Amino acid sequence: MPYEPPVECPLCRETLELDQTLETHLVGSHTHREVARYLASHHERVQPRSVSD
Ligand SMILES: [Zn+2]
């Protein structure tokens, strides 16, 4: 079985337990609002933005 590196939560930077998936962590440790806010801010960062200065 190939070695799987530990998964880090993108919201709280916490390294998950080996038997814990990111989905399980998000559902158990974060609210839908927190996850939604993270996705929204991440999405905004990806959007091209004109340089104003
Ligand atoms: Zn987390």
Image (tube, helix red, strand yellow):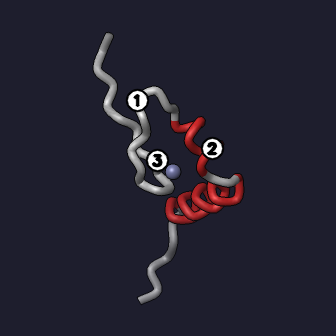
Question: Which residue corresponds to mark 3?
Answer: 9
Q: Is residue 22 left or right of residue 4?
A: right
* Residue lying farthest to the bottom in this orientation: 53
Please name which of the two marks, 1 or 3, marks the residue nearer to the observer: 1
First-in-chain label (1 vs 3): 3
Q: Label 2: few (<14), some or many (≥20) within 10 Å?
A: few
Type of amino acid under label 2: Gly
Looking at the image, do the residues carrying marks 3 and 2 touch, with CB atoms under 8 Å apart?
no
Residue 25 location, x and y as percent?
A: 56, 41
Residue 20 location, x and y as percent?
A: 49, 32
Quarter holding residue 3 = top left
How many numbered badges does the structure rendering display?
A: 3
Task: Report, in whole angstroms, how far the alpha carbon at label 1 lies from the one at label 2.
Answer: 16 Å
Q: Quadrant of the C terminus?
A: bottom left
What element does badge 2 sit on?
helix
Q: In this view, does 48 lie above or below 5?
A: below
First-in-chain label (3 vs 2): 3
Task: Residue at 70%, 59% (x, y): give it.
Answer: 33
First-in-chain label (1 vs 2): 1
Task: Residue at 32%, 10% (x, y): give it.
Answer: 1
Question: Which residue corresponds to mark 1?
Answer: 18
Residue 22 location, x and y as percent?
A: 52, 38
Q: In this view, does 51 lie above or below 15?
A: below
Q: Is residue 41 above or below residue 32?
A: below
Question: Which residue corresponds to mark 2?
Answer: 28
Type of amino acid under label 1: Leu
Type of amino acid under label 3: Cys
Quarter holding residue 36 = bottom right
